[in-house]
Structure formats: C-alpha cells, structure tokens
Amino acid sequence: MPKRTIINEAVQERDFFADVMAVVRQIPKGRVTSYGAIAKYLGAARSARIVGYCMNNSHASKPAVPAHRVVNRNGMLSGKHHFATETRMEELLRKEGVTVKDDQVLDFEKRFWDPATELEL
C-alpha cells in the first residue's frame, strides 16, 4: 500500500518501491550507490534494508533496473546472491568499467553516485 504524505493539507500517495526503482534507473553506467544513500534521498534515512528488499525484487521490473549498481555502504556486493549466478553482479559492473576485487568495488569513493547531490528533489 502506498504511503500517504500530507503536504499543505493535500494527501499524496507514495509508492516507495516505485520511488526506489526510479532513483536506481538514474544511476549512470560505471557508477555505484548505496542502499542507504537511496533511502536518505527518499527521506527515509533509516530504511536502507527496505531499499535492499526492493532491489531483491527488482529483476522483474519494467523498464529494467540496474540493481547491480547498488552496493552496501562499504562498496561490498552484498546483494550478489540475488542475481542469476554468484558472479553476475560483478560481471555487469566490470562491463561498465567498475573494478571489483574480493566482492568490493575498488575506488568506491570515486565511483560513488550520491542521489542527494546528483538529483534534484
């Protein structure tokens, strides 16, 4: 059920899953972000796990969602077991020029895409 938000006495329906998918679709190729950064951008800073849950269920979304670009706050490929194979997330990142070693994005700070600074609210 969409969350209701009251702004200036008007009720707005909010679909958090759809909001997460919309943010993830904007992550540029070759960049990564974290579950927490997405949650914070959406005004739900303590909901990183819910963003992870959304990513676990994103594979059937249309249009496609580049879930491989979402990692944990340390740059670890913590969601890799939700892909078709254990190595698929890493393979997709490598195709985009992202270097991964021992399931961690190297140059994480350089590759990090923060929706709070890259997108307008």
Image (cartoon, rainbow, N blue to C red):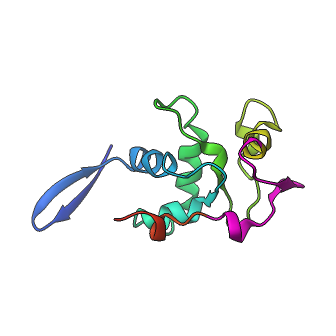
Q: Position of residue 29 (x, y in %)?
A: 62, 48
Question: Which is more toward the observer, 28 or 87?
Answer: 28
Is 103 included in the stretch rendered in magenta? yes
- Asked whether residue 5 is in view, the answer is yes
Q: Residue at x 81, y 62 (%)?
A: 106
Figure quadrant of residue 109: bottom right
Q: Total of numbered circles in the picture?
A: 0
107 displayed left or right of 49: right
At 59% from the left and 42% from the top, the residue drawn is 66
Q: Nearer the viewer, residue 54 or 90?
A: 90
Q: Is residue 12 magenta?
A: no
Which residue: 64% across, 57% down?
32
Which residues make up the magenta segment? 95-112
Image vertical order of residue 61 relative to residue 78, above or below: above
Quadrant containing the N terminus is top left
Q: Quadrant of the C terminus?
A: bottom left
Instruction: Work out which residue is located at the far right of the displayed protein and give it.
Output: 102
Quarter location, residue 119? bottom left
Q: Residue furthest left?
A: 9
* Left or right side of 42 for 49: right
Q: Is residue 11 left or right of residue 84?
A: left
Task: Answer above or below: position of 100 versus 81.
Answer: below
* Residue 63 place in picture, x, y as percent: 46, 31
**Image spot of residue 31 (x, y percent):** 64, 56
Q: Measured along the vertical axis of the image, is residue 6 above or below residue 23?
A: below
